[in-house]
Amino acid sequence: MLPGPKENGPYRDRDIDCQEALQSAFRAVTRLPAQNLVEAAGGKLSPALINLAKDAARVGWGLEEAETAISELAQNYLDDLGE
């Protein structure tokens, strides 16, 4: 199960906490085709990543913030591959 936010409502570094909460689950789906990760980095999530965002929303993250966190994780993943 994904961890929820530390507090209800906005707080400093909530976006980073969201990325950290999703990171392990994101890694489990990084076996997706590279094109899906490229699309996710651009904000177009595959069905598996949309489901991950919905799971995050169920534990207290906003759906939009979860989708943004997933896109940022995808970009970070691609950046790491390029190094």
Image: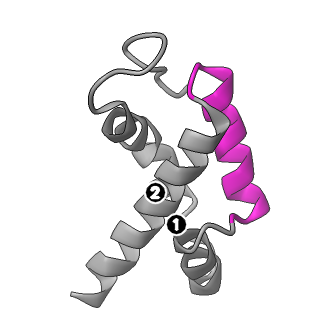
Amino acid carrying label 2: it is Arg
| Relative vertical location of residue 63 with respect to residue 75 in this rendering, above or below | above
| Relative vertical location of residue 17 with respect to residue 45 in this rendering, above or below | above
| Relative vertical location of residue 62 with respect to residue 28 in this rendering, above or below | above
| Dot 2: element | helix
Relative image position of residue 38 (x, y in whole percent) = 55, 81
Relative image position of residue 24 (x, y in whole percent) = 42, 45
Give the magenta part as a residue range: 45-61
**What number of labels is visible?**
2
Of residue 8 and residue 32, the one placed in the foreground of this image is 8
Direction from residue 75 to residue 81 in the image, left or right: left
Of residue 36 and residue 42, the one placed in the foreground of this image is 42
Residue 30 circle label? 1
Q: For the view shown, which residue lies furthest in the left direction?
A: 83
| Dot 1: element | loop
Q: Quadrant of the N terminus?
A: top right
The magenta stretch spans residue 30: no
Residue contact at pointers 1 and 2, CB within 8 angstroms: yes
| Relative vertical location of residue 33 with respect to residue 27 in this rendering, above or below | below
Amino acid carrying label 1: it is Thr
Using a 10 Å C-alpha cutoff, classify the residue at mark 1 as few (fewer than 14 neighbours), some (14 to 19) or many (20 or more): some
Coloration of the structure image:
one colour
Of residue 67 and residue 80, the one placed in the foreground of this image is 67
